Image (tube, rainbow, N blue to C red):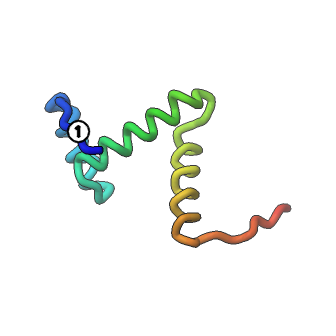
Amino acid sequence: MLKAIKLSESLINDAVINGKAQHRSAPKQIEYWARIGKIADENPDLPLGFIKGILIGIEESKAGDVSDYQFG
C-alpha cells in the first residue's frame, strides 16, 4: 500500500545522504530506519549490530546463501 505522508525536510535530507552511501533511495532509507526502529522498540535489549545481523541473515537465507552452523 502506498500512502503519501509529510516528513520534515531535515529527515529527508538525512535520508538522501545516508541512502546514497548505502545505495538506497531516500524512501527506501526511511523504510530501513523505520524497520530498524520498530525492531529496536519491540526488543530494547538487543544491540543495533545484532539487529542488523539478523536482517542480513534473513536476506541471506532468502537468497539461498545458507550453510549448517559448525559448533565449537
Type of the residue with mark 1: Lys
Which residue corresponds to the image point at 23% horizontal and 47% vertical from the top-left? 26
Name the residue nearer the viewer: 45 or 35: 35
Residue 43 position within the rendered picture, expressed as x and y whole percent measured from the top left: 59, 31
Residue receiving disc 1: 3
Residue 53 position within the rendered picture, expressed as x and y whole percent measured from the top left: 56, 51
Which residue corresponds to the image point at 23% horizontal and 38% vertical from the top-left? 3
User: Left or right of 21: which side holds 57?
Assistant: right
| Circle 1 Cα neighbour tier, 10 Å, few/some/many (<14 / 14–19 / ≥20) | few
Residue 31 position within the rendered picture, expressed as x and y whole percent measured from the top left: 34, 43
Q: Quadrant of the C terminus?
A: bottom right
Q: How many marks?
A: 1
| Residue 61 vertical placement versus 41 (above, below) | below
Residue 10 position within the rendered picture, expressed as x and y whole percent measured from the top left: 18, 31
Name the residue nearer the viewer: 20 or 67: 67
Question: Where is residue 23, by image quadrant?
Answer: bottom left
Residue placed farthest to the front in the image?
A: 1
Residue placed farthest to the left in the image?
A: 9
Question: Where is residue 64, by image quadrant?
Answer: bottom right
Q: Quadrant of the N terminus?
A: top left
Which residue corresponds to the image point at 30% horizontal and 41% vertical from the top-left? 30
| Secondary structure of the residue carrying numbered label 1 | loop
User: Left or right of 34: which side holds 1?
Assistant: left
Which residue corresponds to the image point at 54% horizontal and 65% vertical from the top-left? 62
User: Left or right of 24: which side holds 56?
Assistant: right
| Residue 1 vertical placement versus 69 (above, below) | above
